[in-house]
Amino acid sequence: MVNEPSRALRQALQDRIDNKTKPPGALGRLEEIALQVGLVQQSLNPVLNRPVMLLFAGDHGIALEGVSPYPQAVTAQMVGNFVNGGAAINVFCRQHGIAIEIVDAGVNADLSSLPILHKKIAMGTRSFLQAPAMSEEEFLKAMAAGACLVEQKYKEGSNVIGFGEMGIGNTSSAALVFSVLSGIPLDECIGRGTGLDDEGLRKKKAILHQALDFHKPDGFSPQQVLQVFGGFELVMICGAIIEAAACGMLILIDGFIVTAALVAAVAMEPAVKSHCVYTHLSDEHAHKLMLDYLGGVPLVSLNMRLGEGSGVAVTYPLVESAVLFLRDMASFEDAGVSQSE
């Protein structure tokens, strides 16, 4: 259950922001973020504690149908890269003091020897061309696993969290999830993913339309949409988002895949949106449609489309700056500075 802040707190926070030594609104989006964090934490003096990134990896049966230029084996290979600290997300998390945990949500490989969080549901999902990607039992296990990991981080003292993902084929899953839940035509939701050429994009669209025609998802519940078209990493992120909001955490939203998980989470628990900061506009086709659908305004647009949670890590200092100015910047009264008449 997500707590709704009081009107009195909103007004008190806004007064505190407006009384800082600056013209009203002069810090732009930072003022909006400061207000949001204060409301999420229900405090006039919010603080960001132990920022953490949970990076969920999972394989997709649809990848074997040719929707990606990369082989499925890349998912497991990238998990090894994450463990060795060599990926972009490792670099950016180190730079900004963000703890990172790698989660095997359902990679099609034996990763038992790696020092990661082992939550494997299965060796990847099934191809949703012929069957639902996962069973109801697998769906429920994945939702619960994502929630459990967040609860653990909350109990360890984290109050700000971001989610990353890795899974060859997961832009196909995300496109279908978003299209079915939003009602936006599928063609508008499909992009090049990891770099498809024009012919590859045409093939991807044809395959996803075939899946849509096979399942005929009109009237599906959010759970059914995720169960049929989702990936284990996407479902775990959905469960994690819902739990993070219930715990009163600030949630930093990354790009296309994570936002698709958020669309599903909002369909289940609309109040989670108030806890979410949209860190960037991904260069993946349709991410802007997702943000418009959710009413979200990204902090930055850097033409990034890597995933992994990279947008969260890069923009975390902006969120930190918003909180710090609210806490530490002098008011007109404190500084003895005259306000405008």
Image (cartoon, grey):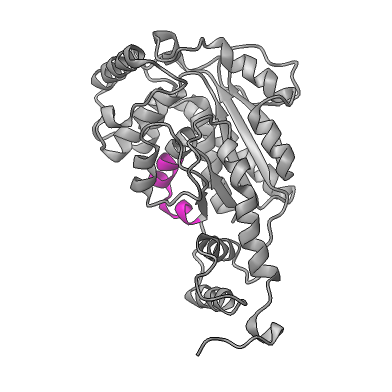
Q: Is residue 95 visible?
A: yes
Is 202 located above or below residue 53 in the figure? above
Specify whether residue 165 is painted magenta: no
Q: Main secondary structure of the magenta part?
A: helix
Residue range corresponding to the magenta coloring? 262-274
Q: Is residue 140 visible?
A: no
Is 184 located above or below residue 83 in the figure? below
Residue, x 71% and y 44% (percent of image)? 96
Residue 269 appears at what percent x and percent y? 43, 49
Residue 113 appears at what percent x and percent y? 75, 15
Q: Nearer the viewer, residue 74 or 222?
A: 74
Residue, x 42% and y 20% (percent of image)? 133
Residue 308 appears at what percent x and percent y? 58, 31
165 on left or right of 152: left
| Image-quadrant location for residue 92 | top right
Residue furthest toward the bottom? 341
Residue 146 appears at what percent x and percent y? 58, 36
Specify whether residue 271 is painted magenta: yes
Is 159 located above or below residue 75 in the figure? below
186 on left or right of 91: left
